[in-house]
Amino acid sequence: MEQLELFLGEVSGFVWGPPLLILLVGTGIYLTIRLGLLQVRLLPYALKLVFTKNQDKESVGDITHFQALSTALAATVGTGNIVGVATAVVLGGPGAVFWMWLSAFFGMATKYGEAVLAVKYRVTDANGQMAGGPMYYLEHGLKQKWLGVLFAIFGAIAAFGIGNGTQSNSVAAVVRDTFSVPTWITGLILTVFAGAVILGGIKTIGKVTSYFVPFMALFYIIAGMAIMVMNLELIGPAFATIFSAAFTGEAAVGGAIGAAIRYGVARGVFSNEAGLGSAPIAAAAAKTDMPGRQALVSMTQVFIDTLIICSITGVTIVMSGLYMDDAYEGSALTTAAFEQFLGPVGPIIVAVGLIFFASSTIIGWSYYGEKCFQYLFKNPSLLIVYRIAFIAMVFVGATVSLDVIWMFSDIMNGLMALPNLIGLLGLSGVIALETKRIVAKIKEEKAAAQSGN
């Protein structure tokens, strides 16, 4: 078993090495340039669209814009926002936070492109529901079905680890350490909760996450903002440290700037999943009249996940200065930072945040995994088999060690990105064309609104 762990660790390091990270960020840079800084120009409109009620009621789709965004956020806002960011700061120094921000900025264009293609090439499945994502735009758009099959295989497997077992394991561990609750009890509660939501399908998932996600995000954001408001004098120095360390490698492993870039980019991508191809699966289910409209909503996912939630974790850790103490790593570092500023309430906030984040990830990834499975096996009756297996994994993950499963799923997670990025680059012309359509539509709507006044 030890030899297998070492082997998988080496493979994971290779898959998530510089070539993939460069390709991920490079695709975002290319789309940013080709789309004319769309994530800056249309971000205010996109944020407004997120909270607009009753839009596209007559359009084809299964869930609303907001429910699609909530489902995607549920899947991405997970342990990476608490554990991943802390790990990045420990290994890459405070400068890693800057590179995390930069990768997220370009990742917004990538996420937009993914959602455009997901809606553009979605289909109606045997159950009468929308099905879309990289596997469909690779098959119908790029005309490379074999790449779609590869993506679906990697995605269906990765869902059990990154989106399930490792999440329930993190929840069970933090509940045990903070509240002294046995892991099997936490596992049982999580399994019942996840089962009730997952068995209801995408409409139930969309409804639950549309209530669940805003609450959990606001809970963590308010706690982080409280720390900053009570320690205003530390914010300026913290940002100065982040920016200076980004180009000096200060406090990074070996003092190298490369460590800050590597871990900042890697953890940013791990958190917001821009370029991995997972989130567009949820975007494809949205009711929308144009691919570009839902894509703008999907773009805000990266903004919320990384530029807001991850930033709260990263800045709080840098403000505390505890990243320089070798005694802390992962969630323990985040917990210690919150405790330093909020006293005994701090660890509880981190624990509750982790419970919400990880639980929501399980729900979101259940949909991603089953859509990948459904693409591979067209028989609708087999879907219940996948759902039951996924639900059972929640309990298994909470009660046993998952080192091997985690590493194997991490590899599958990284491999998902390769066919997806090929599709994004190959179909960038389609993304650009749909962008022109939505920009023209927005101008038309604004002109109509002004004339109406």
Image: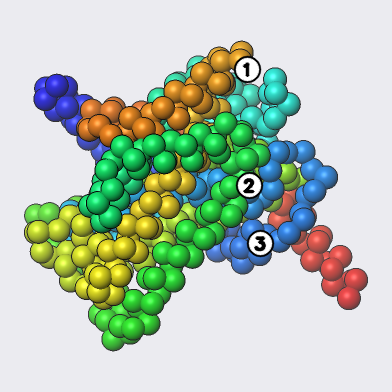
Tag 3: amino acid: Phe
Instruction: From the top left corner, tell me how far across and down residue 171 is, in percent.
Output: 33, 46
31 on left or right of 258: right
Percent of width and height locating residue 236: 30, 81
Query: Which residue is found at the position 48% from the left and 24% from the top?
Result: 388
Task: Please tell me the numbered disc located at residue 207.
Answer: 2
Residue occupying image coordinates x 31% and y 37%: 184
First in sequence: mark 2 or mark 1? Answer: 2
Three-letter amino acid code of the residue under disc 1: Pro
Dot 1: few (<14), some (14–19), or many (≥20) neighbours within 10 Å? few
Check whether the beta carbons of the residues at disc 3 and disc 2 lie within 8 A of each other.
Answer: no
Measured Cα–Cα span from mark 2 to mark 1:
23 Å
Left or right? Give the position of 261 relative to 323.
right
Q: Amino acid at mark 2?
A: Lys
Of label 3 and label 2, which has the lower sequence position? 3
Q: Residue at x 22, y 33 (%)?
A: 401
Quarter of the image where the N terminus is located: top left
Q: Provide the residue designation for mark 3.
A: 51
- Nearest the eye: 364 or 246: 364
- Residue furthest to the bottom in view is 233
- Mark 2, Cα crowd under 10 Å, few <14 / some 14-19 / many 20+, is some
